[in-house]
Amino acid sequence: MTATYVKLQDAHAAETGAAGTWQKIGYIAPGGKNGPESYTTNVFDYTNSFKGADKGTTMVGSIDADTEGWRATAKTALNDCKISSYWTLAFNKSGDGSALKYKAEIKSSGGTDADCEALTANFTNIAHQ
């Protein structure tokens, strides 16, 4: 699901020079729709954390800090991974600002991040530089 988000965001950036909200890039998260750009399953709430400055888009070259665009928050405890722990995917401009680079992180809401990383061992590999 996050690999799809990255591919759609990259395609949008290549065509428009901008990063876009889920609606702008055509991304649909798993589960049932819970709001304009949020979805829910029995286990996770998925949310678009990127609002975009101009009608849901922001020019890649003007992004100068890691900007969260995708988040999955645990609705229940998952083994040792506590409820409300979350997985995020942030983006930033790459090099001259014509492409995006990504940063994937897992944050435990109590306990250690490793408690959640064990559930999705390859999650942080999705981000490419």
Image (spheres, grey):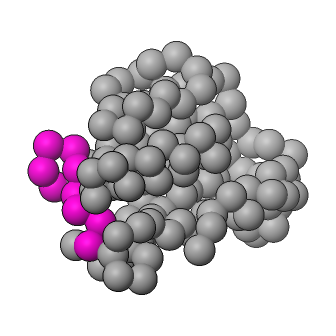
Examine the image and state in which quarter residue 21 appears. Answer: top left
Asked whether residue 36 is in view, the answer is yes
The residue positioned 52% from the left and 37% from the top of the image is 46
- Point out the image quarter for the N terminus: top right
The residue positioned 35% from the left and 82% from the top of the image is 96
Between 42 and 23, the one lying in front of the other is 23
Which residue in the rendered view is the most extreme toward the left? 54
Q: Is residue 52 above or below residue 21?
A: below
Between 107 and 98, the one lying in front of the other is 98
Residue 49, given in percent of the width and then of the height, sits at 38, 49
The residue positioned 22% from the left and 44% from the top of the image is 56
Left or right: where does residue 16 sit relative to residue 26? Answer: left
Q: How many marks?
A: 0
The residue positioned 28% from the left and 59% from the top of the image is 17
Asked whether residue 73 is in view, the answer is no
Examine the image and state in which quarter residue 41 appears. Answer: top right
Between 42 and 10, the one lying in front of the other is 10
Q: Is residue 74 above or below residue 64?
A: above
Is residue 26 rendered magenta in the image?
A: no
Residue 103, given in percent of the width and then of the height, sits at 56, 68
Examine the image and state in which quarter residue 60 appears. Answer: bottom left
Which residue in the rendered view is the most extreme toward the front? 15
Query: What segment is highlighted magenta in the picture?
Result: 53-61
Residue 67, given in percent of the width and then of the height, sits at 38, 65
Which residue in the rendered view is the most extreme toward the bottom? 95
Left or right: where does residue 93 sit relative to residue 126? Answer: left
Q: Is residue 47 above or below residue 123?
A: above
Residue 18, given in percent of the width and then of the height, sits at 28, 56
